[in-house]
Image: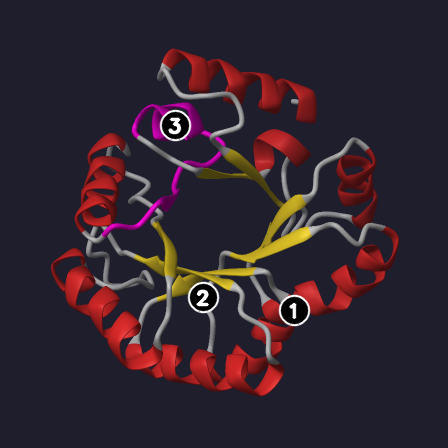
Amino acid sequence: MSLEDVRGRIRAAEAAAGRPEGAVTLIAVSKVQPLARIETALEAGQRVFGENKVQEAAGKWPGLRERFPDVTLHLIGPLQTNKAKQAVALFDAIQTLDRPKLAAKLADAMAATGRAPALFAQVNTGAEPQKAGVLPDDADAFIAACRRYYGFEIAGLMAIPPVDEPAGPHFRLLAEIAARNGIAGLSMGMSDDFEQAIALGATHVRVGSALFGARAY
């Protein structure tokens, strides 16, 4: 599927949900994609990209940003505390804030570098033991602690629903947590379900395989 096809589907989903055109940001998930595919998307005007790993992003984006300086880069994979400073220096948004120790490291890194990437709290809506993210029952307290102790403005919430369950209830749960905490951003929905996510309030959708094709791990 082409970039224009995905953009068209996003515009149609916005219209169907009664939302203004441009309400939803497309994050092109470029992890483990060949450089040629990423360059094709850049040349077609895509400027917001998502990466899973700090090291992989550090290896390819500084060079690309010299040619495309208006790129916005989101970290959408789990972040180890020892990579916090590098992540703050490299990314414009970090979507996987999920524990106090990481919040402390990010606060230190932001103070040291003078950079302030947008921060999204990741919520493990399915309470899956193998998956990162704060549990739904703990989300309100975690958001409050980030604001109180670190002065963070939480720009959004992010979730990855369980693969074997309908995504809709997880999107609704994330939207409810965001609403009661006064959070505007909702990063939810991927290649298979981004239209449903838009119907339920997504402000950011993370689309990889539908945009770039299968990944070559």
Amino acid type for the residue under numbered disc 2? Pro
Q: Quarter-wise, where is residue 203 in the image? A: top left
The tag earlier along the polypeptide, 2 or 1, is 2
What residue appears at the point 37 percent right and 43 percent down from the top-left corner? 186
The residue that mark 1 highlights is 90
Between disc 3 and disc 2, the foreground one is: 3
> Residue 77 or 48: which is nearer the viewer?
48
Measured Cα–Cα span from mark 2 to mark 1: 15 Å
Residue 2 visible in the snapshot: no
**Tag 1: Cα neighbours inside 10 Å, few (<14), some, or many (≥20)?**
many
The residue that mark 3 highlights is 198
Measured Cα–Cα span from mark 3 to mark 2: 24 Å
Q: Is residue 185 magenta?
A: yes
What residue appears at the point 40 percent right and 21 percent down from the top-left corner? 19
96 up-or-down from 17: above or below: below
Amino acid type for the residue under numbered disc 1? Leu
Q: Position of residue 22 (x, y in %)?
A: 53, 27
Between disc 2 and disc 1, the foreground one is: 1
Q: In the drawing, what numbered circle is on residue 78? A: 2
The tag earlier along the polypeptide, 1 or 3, is 1
- Residue 169 horizontal side relative to residue 108, left or right: left
Residue 214 visible in the snapshot: yes
- Residue furthest to the left in view is 137
Amino acid type for the residue under numbered disc 3? Ile
179 up-or-down from 113: above or below: above
